């Protein structure tokens, strides 16, 4: 009985600590941002006066309108392209599926600044294909949409591939038995079965684009959007209150999209049948050739975007001397950042990988495995999913208001590497938490019941059973944090100091200083590092899988 009481007390303490941590790193910074929007610079409460000033500024209102329509257009285009690609990967028998899938996922390893820089070299004033646009300019809505579609395509593809792959094979068999044409089968079986995936993908891309800072900052030109407005208000004009108002406005579409996505996901889960069978597509020569050609064009466009940035980074002097050299990689002679920024990004990536993997595994364990404190566990799960609805820019500005407050005992974190790690972990916490939760749900509760009946302490079961089974997922989550820490800009752009400048921030600063080729070099280096890091984490996961879960194989 005493052991059981001790276990309950430890569980309660763990839940309380986890809840307090998430409140501090997510809820309170967002609350601080919302609160600041109702005060003036002197700290006096002004109610809705700041919002009235916002509505009286035509440029800020136009930025909100631009953000919505550009994000909506990008979401529609990206979802349509990703749907065709996902259909080809899952419901066709075309060749080269593995390489084509790998190429489509490459933008996950690159900061959003990379496609924007590539667009400058492809279609800018000195771009190699500048005449292809006729009278259009890449600096504006066209550039924002093209760059946004490029870097959000993998996110939509992953969602749609999963949605289409879960189609019930019995429906296809019934439709073929009734003599339905392939087009009718697509309209009556494939499309309805994946409609929720389409909605979720569209919502996810919409939120990613409307909250992205990198693409509009580089190729947005005179087209104002909410993401760049926050940066101008906070960094450029030091108008923190108006920055809080813009952040509050940016939070509204993100929260609404999050609510719609959650509702759609629940309906999608409820629509799945326990008797469903996997669908195995049959080869159709013409269809497979057409889909292969379309996917090949999309993959080629992705490789051109990435290859253009790499080529520009190696060109001696664009566009007059294209002989390869490493001059642009001499970051110590460039404005905006040096090799120290790259080293700082490595520190951030490794720190976020370690802290994030441990924190999300423990949070998932506390939500899934204890049998007591149901309300506390539900509250923890709710807080763990909250970052999905908070854009990185909003979280970054919230960190300024919360952690930089003189009365905050955590004020000492501000300006150091620790706050960058904390902000990065908080920003990407939700997806990692859900991933760890899924891994722990593979284990039946019988393990805990047997251990409890034998008097085995829960921490020993955690160490000897739960962690070994979930270790490959923990390492996968570590790789997820590492890649995002290397490539993110929005969440940390307001928090770095001269001593903690990051590689992605250096890309931004170099581009601002006119050093576009060195910016391309740093972006290419970030992508290479993210790829190597992801590969190492994947190898470690495979080794852990072989060592800890050999019982799975006969």
Image (cartoon, rainbow, N blue to C red):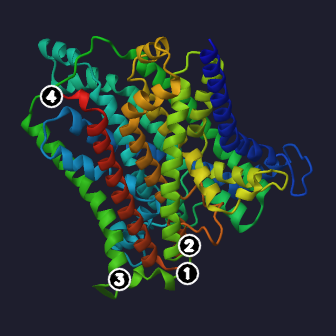
Q: Which of labels 4 and 3 is toward the front?
A: 3
Could you tell which of marks 1 and 2 lies nearer the N-terminus? 1
Q: Residue 171 at x, y = what percent?
A: 23, 15
Q: Residue 326 at x, y = what percent?
A: 35, 83
Quadrant that contains the N terminus: top right
Could you tell which of marks 4 and 1 lies nearer the N-terminus? 4
Could you tell which of marks 1 and 3 lies nearer the N-terminus? 3
Tags 1 and 2 touching, CB below 8 Å = yes
Q: Which of labels 4 and 1 is toward the front?
A: 1
Residue at x-position 65% and y-position 42%: 251
Q: Residue 125 at x, y = what percent?
A: 42, 77
Please state which of residues 366 and 194 is positioned toward the viewer in this rendering: 366
User: Could you classify mark 3 by the number of other residues whose Cα lies within 10 Å: few (under 14), some (14-19), or many (20 or more)?
Assistant: few
Left or right for 468, reference 495: left
Query: What is the tally of numbered marks visible in this picture?
Result: 4
- Give the SS element for disc 1: loop
- Name the residue tied to disc 2: 509
- Name the residue tied to disc 4: 281
Could you tell which of marks 2 and 3 lies nearer the N-terminus? 3
Quadrant that contains the C terminus: top left
- Name the residue tied to disc 1: 335
- Name the residue tied to disc 3: 326
Tags 2 and 3 touching, CB below 8 Å = no
User: Could you classify mark 2 by the number of other residues whose Cα lies within 10 Å: few (under 14), some (14-19), or many (20 or more)?
Assistant: some
Residue 294 appearing in the image: no
Left or right for 492, reference 274: right
- Give the SS element for disc 4: loop
- Give the SS element for disc 2: helix
Q: Which of labels 4 and 2 is toward the front?
A: 2
Left or right for 376, reference 299: right
Q: Give the CA separation, mark 1 to mark 3.
A: 17 Å
């Amino acid at each position: 009985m005493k052991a059981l009481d001790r276990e309950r007390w430890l569980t309660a303490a763990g839940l309380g600590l986890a809840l307090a941590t998430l409140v501090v790193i997510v809820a309170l910074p967002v609350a601080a941002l919302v609160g600041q929007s109702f005060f003036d610079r002197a700290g006096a409460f002004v109610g809705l006066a700041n919002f009235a000033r916002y509505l009286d500024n035509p440029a800020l209102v136009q930025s909100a309108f631009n953000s919505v329509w550009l994000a909506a257009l990008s979401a529609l285009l990206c979802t349509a392209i990703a749907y065709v690609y996902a259909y080809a990967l899952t419901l066709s028998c075309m060749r080269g599926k593995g390489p084509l899938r790998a190429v489509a996922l490459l933008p996950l390893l690159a900061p959003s600044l990379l496609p924007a820089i590539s667009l400058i070299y492809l279609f800018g004033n000195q771009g190699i294909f500048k005449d292809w646009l006729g009278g259009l300019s890449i600096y504006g809505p066209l550039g924002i949409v093209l760059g946004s579609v490029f870097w959000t395509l993998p996110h939509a593809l992953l969602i749609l591939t999963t949605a289409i792959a879960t189609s019930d094979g019995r429906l296809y068999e019934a439709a073929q038995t009734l003599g339905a044409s392939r087009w009718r089968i697509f309209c009556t079986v494939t499309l309805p079965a994946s409609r929720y995936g389409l909605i979720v993908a569209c919502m996810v891309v919409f939120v990613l684009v409307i909250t992205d800072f990198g693409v509009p900052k580089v190729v947005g030109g005179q087209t104002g959007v909410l993401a760049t407005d926050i940066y101008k208000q906070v960094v450029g004009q030091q108008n923190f209150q108006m920055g809080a108002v813009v952040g509050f406005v940016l939070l509204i579409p993100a929260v609404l999209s999050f609510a719609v996505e959650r509702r759609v996901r629940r309906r999608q889960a409820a629509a799945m049948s326990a008797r469903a069978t996997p669908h195995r597509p049959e080869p159709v020569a013409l269809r497979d050739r057409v889909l292969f050609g379309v996917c090949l064009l999309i993959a080629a466009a992705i490789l051109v975007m990435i290859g253009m940035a790499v080529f520009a980074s190696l060109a001696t002097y664009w566009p007059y001397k294209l002989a390869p050299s490493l001059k642009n990689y001499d970051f110590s002679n460039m404005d905006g950042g040096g090799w120290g920024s790259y080293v700082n990004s490595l520190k951030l990536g490794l720190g976020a990988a370690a802290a994030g993997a441990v924190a999300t595994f423990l949070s998932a364990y506390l939500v899934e495995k204890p049998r007591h404190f149901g309300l506390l566990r539900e509250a923890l799960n709710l807080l763990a999913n909250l970052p999905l609805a908070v854009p990185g820019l909003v979280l970054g500005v919230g960190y300024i208001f919360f952690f930089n407050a003189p009365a905050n005992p955590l004020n000492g974190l501000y300006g150091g590497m620790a706050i960058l790690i904390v902000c990065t972990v908080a920003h990407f916490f939700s997806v990692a938490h859900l991933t760890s939760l899924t891994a722990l749900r593979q284990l039946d509760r019988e393990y805990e019941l047997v251990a409890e009946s034998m008097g085995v302490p829960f921490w020993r079961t955690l160490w000897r059973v739960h962690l070994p089974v979930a270790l490959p997922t923990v390492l996968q989550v570590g790789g997820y944090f590492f890649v995002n820490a290397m490539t993110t800009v929005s969440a940390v752009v307001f928090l770095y100091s001269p001593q903690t400048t990051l590689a992605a921030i250096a890309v931004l600063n170099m581009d601002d200083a006119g050093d576009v080729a060195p910016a391309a070099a740093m972006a290419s280096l970030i992508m290479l590092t993210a790829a190597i890091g992801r590969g190492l984490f994947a190898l470690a996961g495979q080794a852990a899988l072989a060592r800890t879960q050999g019982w799975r194989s006969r």
